[in-house]
Image (cartoon, rainbow, N blue to C red):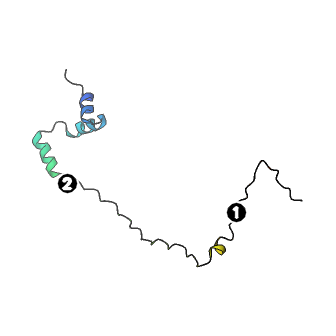
């Protein structure tokens, strides 16, 4: 009787592979021997944080220069749209 091992492992989030590995490594040891082994183990090494790459700061480019020209010259290239009325026939260019 008792609770199946698979249920206990699932409750504690331990895989069966890990359990059987631990069982083969530590089975038969007394509590005092386990404590001694733990005391002899080196402390875990903390992972080193990744080196951050500092990107060079690039200043934003200045806005384009607008020359002091009259509006008529500045907008000379812009053409006014032609309005076509559908109720009158469109004149043909011959």
Q: Is residue 71 left or right of residue 27?
A: right
Quarter of the view holding residue 53: bottom left
Q: Nearer the viewer, residue 42 or 29?
A: 42
Q: Earlier in the sequence, mark 1 or mark 2?
A: 2
Residue at the limit of the structure toward the front, as seen here: 88
Tell me the SS state at disc 1.
loop
Q: Which residue is mark 2?
A: 43
Residue at the limit of the structure toward the right, as seen here: 94
Q: Which label lies toward us, 1 or 2?
A: 1
Q: Which residue is mark 1?
A: 80
Return the x and y of residue 35 as percentages of the image width and height: 12, 45
Return the x and y of residue 69 as percentages of the image width and height: 61, 78
> Which residue is pictured at 57% across the width and 75% down the height?
66
Q: Residues within 10 Å of mark 2 (few under 14, many from 20)?
A: few
Return the x and y of residue 61 as percentages of the image width and height: 49, 72
Q: Is residue 27 left or right of residue 89?
A: left
> Which residue is pictured at 15% across the width and 39% down the height?
29
Q: Residues within 10 Å of mark 1 (few under 14, many from 20)?
A: few
């Amino acid at each position: 009787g008792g609770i199946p091992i698979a249920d206990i492992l699932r409750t504690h989030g331990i895989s069966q592979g890990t359990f059987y590995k631990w069982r083969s490594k530590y089975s038969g040891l007394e509590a005092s021997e386990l404590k001694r082994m733990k005391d002899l183990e080196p402390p875990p090494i903390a992972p080193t944080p990744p080196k951050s790459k500092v990107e060079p700061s690039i200043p934003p480019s200045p806005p384009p220069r607008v020359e002091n020209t009259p509006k008529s010259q500045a907008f000379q290239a812009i053409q006014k749209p032609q309005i076509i009325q559908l109720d009158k026939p469109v004149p043909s260019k011959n």
